[in-house]
Image (cartoon, rainbow, N blue to C red):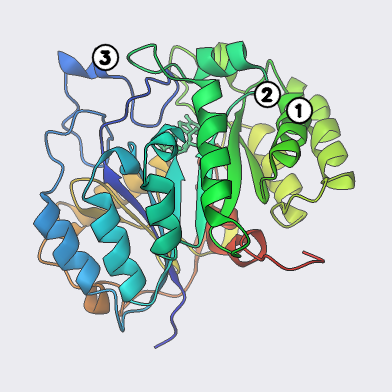
Amino acid sequence: MPRDVTLLWALRSPCAFACPHCYFGTIEEHKDDPPEQAGVLSHLARTDLPANVLTDFARTLADSPVERVIIAGGEPLDWPAALEVISLIKAGGCQVVVATNGVPLTRPHVAERLVALGVDGVSVSLDSADPETNDQMRPSRSGRFGYHDVLEGIGALLQARGARPAPRVGIYTVVTRSRPQEITDVARLAASLGVDYYVPQPISLAADHQLFHPMCHTPGDVADVGEYLDLLYSAPQGLALPDPSYVQRFIAAISTHDGGHVPDCFGGARLFFIQPDGSVWDCPSDRRIAAQVTHARGLRHTIEDGDARTLFATRPTCTDCSLFSRDCVNMWPLVLDMPRLLNPGPGR
Ligand SMILES: C[S@@+](CC[C@H](N)C(=O)[O-])C[C@H]1O[C@@H](n2cnc3c(N)ncnc32)[C@H](O)[C@@H]1O
């Protein structure tokens, strides 16, 4: 059985940040009206699985088709048991990449533990090179943390890594229509910090989201975004970037809201998404989840009492997917580009 599956595992729902555009929605909108529909994410942790269920599942990853696990959420590193889960995944022979808001890296021992556990990559979210703009996009709930803590966290991780090759450290930036210049501004900042890889990704919001019009790109934004992406790829400043085909995918996604077609989509074949409640989906795209809910009629897969050796053993080959959206753009870096982003060698 080939070992070629990537899991994007949203480990926990809570997060100390309250980004108004977050895929998980906001606590304010959910506290009176918690979402009940399958596949809808929330920072409320009402249905998050207990730690022992997660560790039981993590133990089944050895000898499974899973090659790589991207740990996300919510904020995984605010949950102390995350380090045990990561340790079990590594013991199962999988590559591990942790997606974090960066602040937990400033706490004593978190960065050291990630290095000691042999974590392969840490992707830190930063949405602007300008402190004030970043902290508006990514406000902490307490108002006590922000841009400067994120930079301190990146510094702490790079220092803990020292001369070792891993973890590779990356920055992920959500690009909105009003600030295409962040594509190159954050790259410059990332390079100056000594970061290894960089992924700017388009914001993705449902058409009825209150931030859809101010934040989501329209076809009129394509030329500006294309110009900044071209500048980034012509001068990557030593940063590893997704394969150049990423640019066309980014541009295609923001050129329309009507979707598109992906021949040979790896969702449900080489990529799966696990929600904090244990539900397993072909991919985190809201369109693909909605389609699965319709087709599965209640027959959903879950990691609760699940075994990775069987859950991902009988999987279809890649499909022709007609649900391409902005959500999809970042899936190629997770699945196909990760070896390139994590490569410590020259000439990447
Ligand atoms: C949901 S967060 C979870 C991991 C971690 N707490 C963090 O802040 O990176 C994962 C990534 O999704 C991005 N993200 C959240 N909502 C998004 C949206 N509507 N469109 C595009 N990216 C989004 C975040 O900026 C972050 O880089």
Identify the residue at horizontal 17%, vertical 62% (top origin): 55
The amino acid on which the numbered mark 2 sits, given as a three-letter code, is Ala
Dot 3 or dot 1: first in sequence order is 3
Tell me: is circle 1 under 8 Å from ligand 1. no
Dot 2 or dot 3: first in sequence order is 3
Q: Is residue 4 above or below residue 55?
A: below
Q: Position of residue 330 (x, y in %)?
A: 56, 47
**Residue 112 visible to the viewer:** yes
Helix, strand or loop status at disc 1:
helix
Are discs 3 and 1 less than 8 Å apart at CB?
no
135 displayed left or right of 279:
right
Q: Give the position of the N terminus as an image quadrant.
A: bottom left
User: CA separation, marks 3 and 1?
Assistant: 32 Å
Residue under pointer 1: 185
Mark 2 residue crowding within 10 angstroms, few (<14) / some (14–19) / many (20+)? many
Mark 3 residue crowding within 10 angstroms, few (<14) / some (14–19) / many (20+)? few
Dot 1 or dot 2: first in sequence order is 2
Residue under pointer 3: 29
Identify the residue at horizontal 61%, vertical 67% (top origin): 339
Residue under pointer 2: 129
The amino acid on which the numbered mark 1 sits, given as a three-letter code, is Asp
Are discs 1 and 2 less than 8 Å apart at CB?
yes
Mark 1 residue crowding within 10 angstroms, few (<14) / some (14–19) / many (20+)? some
- Res. 258 image quadrant: top right
The amino acid on which the numbered mark 3 sits, given as a three-letter code, is Glu
